[in-house]
Amino acid sequence: MTNEFLLVFRRDALSNDNNMSPEQLQAMMKPWQDWMGSLAAQNKLVSSGNRLASDGRVVQPHQVTTNGPYVEIKEAIGGYIIIRAESLDEAAELSKDCPILQVGGNVEVRSIIPMENSI
Amino acid sequence: MLKCAVLSLWKTAFSLPLKPFMEEAELIPHLFRTEYRKIISVLCKFLGLEHIKIAEDIVSDTFLLAAETWGQKGLPKNPTAWLYTVSKNKAYDVLKRHKIFTEKIVREIQLDSEHIAENNIDLSKENIVDSQLQMMFAICHPAIGIEAQIGLSLSILCGFGVEEIADAFLSNKDTIYKRLARAKEKLKSEQIKLELPPAHDISKRLETVLTTLYLLFSEGYYSSSQNTILRKDLCMEAMRLNLMLTEHEATNSPATNALLALMCFHASRFDARTHQNGDIILYEEQDESLWNQELISRGEHYLNRASTGSVLSKYHLEAAIAYWHTHKNDTPEKWENILQLYNRLLQIEYSPIAALNRTYALSKANGKTEAIREAEKLNLQENHLYHSLLGTLYMDIDKQKAQMHLKTAMDLAKTTADKKTIQSKLDASF
């Protein structure tokens, strides 16, 4: 039986990627596309997920809204995908080739609780 | 010679010339292909889709009569007009004899009046086009299973006989006959009407139509049937129907154009990819002077027309991959593009063949070592193409492993054509 896992990509919030040339962007995209293509070729990609922009808001109780989610944590979520694997161990194994690891980031691997069991 | 054949494939698909010097022996089959679906669509529009069997009988009778009469008396001046008139008259005769209509309709159409008759069965160009489009949507109705959709398309829209369909599907006449009968029953029981879907529904319904055309084309292109002419006909018919969709505003979507581009690029290699005896010639070994440049440029035209809107369909990606394959030279740019297109295609829809092709592109773009590592993750050990690919990848790295994989591929391959391809790779490895 296969299960679904959420992979959350985190990296240093302070890095600023806004000044990249198209060539640099292209060069940065390739390892990601190759890695996702590899997962998809193994029929293990459930959803290509989304990339997240670096700006954000944190809404807190008592009408407090702050800029950016990174006031207290240094790492920001850069994106996520959903994969299919036999076990948490396999999902973690599949994450070891993730390009985020090459730039000092990390991958958080979480089991997704199937809908019918969540009640 | 081979080039001529592709050119004629193209010309028949896109301009339908009726050569005056065409022998009647080939004229009737030709007219059958081109006129069958037109007449049957118009008759069904008139009789109601629930009477599709009657419409089929009328058209078959008409062609039978044509074969007999033209054989004895020679060709009429305008064979197409002859077919229209005869089938029209037969339809009215049938109506008179069988009383298939409710009294109300019978009264309305006043069977004895020539004048009214002409207005009723409308074989004008516009109505022929509209009826055919509506027939495509009726046949590709989501209530009908995909295999039955393809069968019905071949039978009604392409004028293929049960025997030809059985040959294309590598099945037997009985099975196909039953499948078609069930599908027609379904048209009736689901009360499917000959009409275009409402505007809000058309893009969703168009997806089903495109899927059927895609499969129709693939059936011709990849079928292991040895009948090359039949397979070419299948591809040509799929292209013709697809072209019809691009000529109608409501169905002329970017995906429709992308699919037609894909078909043009593939069809451009039709004559280069098989030997005279039907054996497959691998892409790498094809003589590119046999690639049809006219079809390639048509493909580019439709790919440009597909490049609007925001939806990137799998047809766009597959057409772009096929486009890069029309460049014979191995440049890093070519294989990097193909790799990225496969990466995206697989994210939209997984298929074992796309996974294997992606791995081949990976070997060209990123090197064989990485490709072998990726190939071994694929979990397609039961697939002969998987072992054939690993055999190719290992060839310069580990000859023993390469031969081991090719032998496994040999054991798993089912068709003679596949076995021959693998055997020649194996022979070359010693």
Image: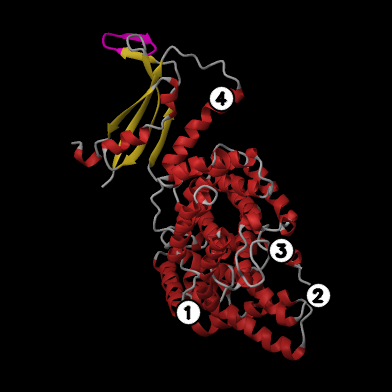
**Dot 2 falls on which chain?**
B
Q: Nearer the viewer, residue B371 or B233?
A: B371
- Residue type (three-letter) at the residue carrying disc 1: Lys
Residue B158 vs B285, above or below: the answer is below
What residue range appears in magenta? Answer: A60-69
Marks 3 and 4 on same chain = no
Q: Nearer the viewer, residue B14 or B408?
A: B408
Q: Which mark is residue B6?
A: 3
Name the mark nearer the viewer: 4 or 2: 4
- Residue type (three-letter) at the residue carrying disc 3: Val
Residue A113 vs B34, above or below: the answer is above
Farthest residue to the right: give it: B21
Marks 2 and 3 on same chain = yes
Distance (Cα) linking label 2 and label 3: 21 Å
Q: Which residue is mark 1?
A: B173
CB atoms of marks 3 and 4 within 8 Å: no
Farthest residue to the bottom: give it: B72
Q: Which mark is residue B427?
A: none
Q: Residue at x 51, y 46 (%)?
A: B358
Say which quarter of the image contains residue B228: bottom right
Name the mark nearer the viewer: 1 or 2: 1
Camera sees residue B92: no
Task: Tell me the quadrant of the picture where the N terminus of chain B can be found.
Answer: bottom right
Task: Tell me the quadrant of the picture where the C terminus of chain B can be found.
Answer: bottom right
Distance (Cα) linking label 4 and label 1: 57 Å
- Residue type (three-letter) at the residue carrying disc 2: Pro
Q: Position of residue B124 (x, y in %)?
A: 68, 65
Q: Residue at x 50, y 44 (%)?
A: B345
